Image (cartoon, coloured by chain):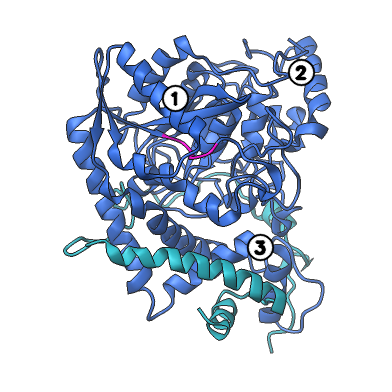
Chain colours: A blue, B cyan
Amino acid sequence: MDWHGVATHAGARERWKAFVASRQDELGSFLQFDPALGAVDSASSGPLAGVPFAVKDNIAVRGFRLTCGSRMLRDFVSPYSATAVERLQKAGGIVAGKANLDEFGMGSSTENSALMVTRNPWDPGRVPGGSSGGPAAAVAAGLAAFGLGSDTGGSVRQPAAFCGIYGLKPTWGAVSRFGLVAYASSLEVIGVMAKTVDMTEKAFAVMRGEDPRDQSSLAWQPAPLRKGKLSIGVPRECADVPMHADVRKTFEKTRRTLKELGHEVREVSFPTLDHVVSSYYVIATAEASANLARFDGVRYGHRAAHADTPEAMTIASRTEGLGPEVKLRILLGTYVLRSGFQDEYYLRAQKIRTAIRMDFQKAFEGVDLVLMPVYPVPPFQRGSADADPFMQKLADIFTCAANLAGLPALSFPAAVEAALPIGMQFLAPAFGEDLLFSICRQLEKGFPSPDAPGFPAGWK
Amino acid sequence: MDASELAITARMARLSLTKEELEKLGVAVEQMLQHFSHMKEIDIQGLAPTTHALLRENRLREDAENGPALSDTLLGNAPEREERFIVIPNVL
């Protein structure tokens, strides 16, 4: 589908808007849909001229609300735009609207949003994944050409896999985080979700690069692209992880397909795999407890109606404004940073993080890419019927390793089983995004992103 | 973690939890801490901690005006204000 000009040519724009309106009640992907407001800061020409995109609502767009899916920021209007958004706008891209998410990016189902329910376009009884479930559902349903999400522990790749589209988690620092509301700064990065590898790459190419407004951003320094036969590593420890039969089957199928394409697939060792979830949750919650301390009800955000002292106001505002999953992570993070417990949890987790990085370093001495599933189960049912919040955290095992090591990873649709999409992912050494696009393009020829029910957009 | 430890942690995090919330979150916190306890099984002898995977040195920029003035739109988000002052409960 050609998205160029869709948001700018009057005829196409009206058909597109009518189509979005016809799906919104059912899918709940957008918290705010306003392409007219989105067009204000966009250039009239460029590689993305008139291409509408959805922005996860923890990424700032000037004039739009920036709710983070939280009661705390329900009415907050952003005074400026994230650098990633600004760059896309300069390339002609148009913000269609702000898309739903788990509150502050904390979750795997988008059910932790305090503001809206988002459903999976493949099956409204199932979650779209999370935390970037809104943009993933929007892209999979044909409401936007691509979506911006943030990936702290898998929040771009897992919803992309759940919705049958591509999801790129770039190298940490490759995309500026200026304008991304901080959850766990050392882990997160803004990523892209789209129906094709081309569109994913196009948006990434525009967004990336050093930004003086983000000290941790890095200049684009692509690894030389290896052509021809590749060596692809599969961690042998993956076999020990409990996995749904359909995911296991797809994992095997993908290995076979890669061999048929002429690549070498071989086992690599990833002994720390069993510890990535612990290390990740200690570090992520510790950083969250510090980052979310800013929500104190003073300068912006929810303020409790009655309080006698500033401190009572802060406590009441936070208690009323934040949801249970956010409170849980703040409590955990506060605990692991408490004096007396720091060495046992936070310092230890950071040392394990070093061990995880070394495992990857060793693996990449022998292989070009690492292949893993994205998530151990297919899209699960709403209401945690078949995956409670604790299980959902354990299931981050395949995704959060890339965040701990700062590596790029691209999840791709690999199968449809029982009418649900299943995703796999490749991981590459830092700045190896070009290789990720190249290998996924090879697989895309045989298995393009499958269309969700209702996708052939009525406005086309 | 027992209930009093959880209450202390909540106070440090500036959260006021009802008895019901304390019970519910207490179970979830304990579940995660149990999981974290497996970190003891891995040998980390001699490893330095990683705070960031790819971090460059600090960079400096010219001390010059940068970007548009945002104070009006920022103030527009204040929950309560008098002209250009943000109102909070009495400090003293």
In the image, residue A332 sits, relative to residue A312, either above or below, namely above
The answer to which of B74 and A362 lies nearer the viewer is: A362
A39 lies left or right of B25 = right
> What's drawn in magenta, residue-wise?
A373-377
Magenta segment main secondary structure: loop
Residue B90 horizontal/vertical position (percent): 73, 84
Q: Identify which amino acid the numbered label 2 is placed on.
A: Trp
Quarter residue A8 falls in: top right
- Please identify, in this view, whether the residue under mark 3 or under mark 1 is nearer the observer: 3
Residue A45 horizontal/vertical position (percent): 59, 15
First in sequence: mark 2 or mark 3?
2
Q: Residue at x 33, y 11 (%)?
A: A261
Query: Callout 2: helix, strand or loop?
Result: helix
Crowding at dot 3, Cα within 10 Å, few <14 / some 14-19 / many 20+, comes out as some
Q: Residue at x 62, y 10 (%)?
A: A2
Crowding at dot 2, Cα within 10 Å, few <14 / some 14-19 / many 20+, comes out as many
Query: Callout 1: helix, strand or loop?
Result: helix
Q: Identify which amino acid the numbered label 1 is placed on.
A: Ala
A333 lies left or right of A408 = right
Quarter residue A10 falls in: top right
Q: Which residue is mark 3?
A: A324
Q: Residue at x 71, y 83 (%)?
A: A309
If the image is split into quadrants, where does the C terminus of chain A sit? Answer: top right
Q: Which residue is mark 1?
A: A205
Residue A210 appears in the figure: yes
| Label at residue A16 | 2
Q: Are marks 2 and 1 on the same chain?
A: yes
Q: Residue at x 73, y 75 (%)?
A: B88
Residue A15 horizontal/vertical position (percent): 80, 15
